[in-house]
């Protein structure tokens, strides 16, 4: 399980880096390809991301699992969730949400909203990358 947790952590870091690079490109004026689709509201996405982080941190796997799109639920495992909770323990008590960036993505004609959220904890920050389909179902939740 330790090796799997490390692999998940490395993959999460790579995915987060890719999304952050896209956000940097957006904020530095390198085109509007990451513009949030009209079907999303930026403040709603930010609020939902914070709510989903709070739910995930509550040690409620079933409730958190239910937030995912049925198309991706088969990839969401209790082992990965347990590894996530271990990371939370290492970071200590939640203090507050920090900066949040929201960008849009389009893939195969489907629009997605991606929120990059900093969650401040007593022993360090956690950077989340959370993506939603147009029905506001989770399709990605990585740290």
Image: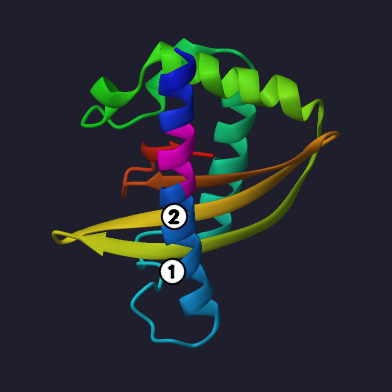
SS type, badge 1: helix
Compare residues 127 and 61 and report the one nearer the observer.
127
Q: Position of residue 55 (x, y in %)?
A: 59, 24
Name the residue nearer the viewer: 106 or 18: 18
Disc 1 from disc 2: Cα separation: 10 Å
Q: Is residue 81 left or right of residue 109?
A: right
Q: Secondary structure at mark 2?
A: strand
Residue 10 is inside the magenta segment: yes
Nearest-to-viewer mark from 1 and 2: 1
Q: Nearer the viewer, residue 32 or 40?
A: 32
Q: Report the residue marked by disc 1.
A: 22
Range covered by the magenta-colored residues? 8-13
| Residue plotted at (40% across, 73% down) | 35
Label 2 near label 1: C-beta < 8 Å?
yes
Question: Within 10 Å of the Cα at label 1, are there few (<14), some (14-19), or many (20+) other Cα atoms?
Answer: some
The total of numbered circles placed on residues is 2
Mainly helix, strand or loop, the magenta region? helix
Circle 2 is placed at which residue position? 114
Task: Pick out the residue farthest to the front.
Answer: 3
Which residue is found at the position 58% from the left and 57% from the top? 43
User: How crowded is the residue under tag 2: few (<14 C-alpha within 10 Å), some, or many (20+)?
Assistant: many
The disc, 1 or 2, on the residue closer to the chain's N-terminal end is 1
Q: Which corner quadrant holds the N terminus?
A: top left
Tell me residue 30's x, y (percent). 43, 86
Q: Using residue 23 as the reference point, say whether residue 118 is left or right of it.
A: right
Residue 142 location in percent, x, y? Answer: 48, 39
Residue 53 sits inside the magenta stretch? no
Colour mapping used in the image:
rainbow
Q: Based on the displayed image, in which of its 4 quarters is residue 97 positioned?
A: top right
The residue lying at 39 percent from left, 64 percent from top is 104
Q: Foreground residue, 112 or 141?
A: 141
What's the residue at 48%, 51% (across, down)?
16
């Amino acid at each position: 399980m330790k090796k799997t947790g490390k692999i998940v952590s490395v993959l999460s870091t790579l995915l987060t880096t890719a999304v952050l690079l896209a956000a940097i490109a957006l904020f530095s004026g390198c085109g509007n390809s990451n513009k949030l689709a009209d079907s999303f509201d930026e403040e709603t996405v930010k609020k939902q991301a914070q709510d989903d982080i709070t739910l995930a941190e509550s040690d409620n796997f079933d409730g958190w699992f239910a937030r995912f799109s049925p198309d991706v639920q088969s990839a969401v495992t209790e082992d990965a969730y347990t590894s996530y909770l271990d990371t939370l323990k290492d970071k200590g008590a939640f203090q507050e949400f920090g900066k949040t960036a929201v960008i849009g993505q389009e893939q195969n004609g489907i629009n997605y909203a991606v929120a990059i959220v900093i969650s401040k904890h007593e022993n360090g920050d956690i950077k989340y990358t959370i993506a939603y389909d147009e029905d506001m179902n989770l399709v990605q939740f990585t740290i």
